[in-house]
Amino acid sequence: MRVSYSALSSFNQCPLKYKWQHIDRIKVPTTPDLFFGSLIHEVLEFSLKKGTLLPLEKSLEYYKTNWRANVYKDDATQKEAYDSGLEMIKNFYSSYKPGKIQVLSTEKFFEIYWQDHKIVGKIDRIDKLPTGEIEI
């Protein structure tokens, strides 16, 4: 059996949810929280794609281009989320220390075999710290 962390999490929440999402493959409408988290993740992955940090302006442009206001129920909620995302991206850039941390990989696929099962997933980011240690 091949299984991912998200599939296991769905099963733990509700076996029927697991069945609908991972066996029947019923599409779930995007929620504002899921959309927001996915977009921030995409922006940061885009920003570090080549192992070095792209200029802030390019990342903000990517964020603006991929923003979908229609996911939100009203303009006020949409604006609050949008502004929050801008701040998160800017904070990431202000805390990033080039030369101090070496990005080794992003979106690294892995598979682990356990008994008769294969657990698969992706590691968002792997860094080499100044101490030589690896941070996942």
Image (cartoon, rainbow, N blue to C red):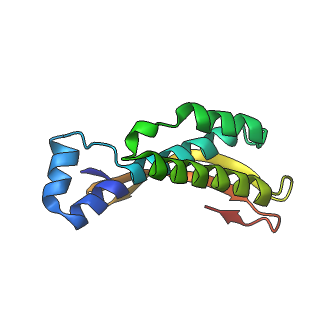
- Left or right: where 30 falls relative to 130: left
- Left or right: where 42 falls relative to 4: right
Report the number of numbered marks. 0
Q: Is residue 108 above or below residue 113?
A: above
Q: Is residue 102 above or below residue 130?
A: above
> What is the x, y in percent for residue 116?
26, 57
- Residue 110 in sight: no
| Residue shown at 60% from the left, 42% from the top | 43
| Residue shown at 59% from the left, 55% from the top | 84
- Left or right: where 27 falls relative to 35: left
Quadrant of the frame with the C terminus: bottom right
Q: Nearer the viewer, residue 13 or 81?
A: 81
Q: Residue furthest right?
A: 99
> What is the x, y in percent for residue 91?
71, 58
Q: Nearer the viewer, residue 125 or 38?
A: 38
- Left or right: where 81 falls relative to 14: right
For residue 95, which quarter of the picture?
A: bottom right
| Residue shown at 60% from the left, 38% from the top | 63
Q: Nearer the viewer, residue 77 or 44?
A: 77
- Residue 92 in sight: yes
| Residue shown at 60% from the left, 51% from the top | 83
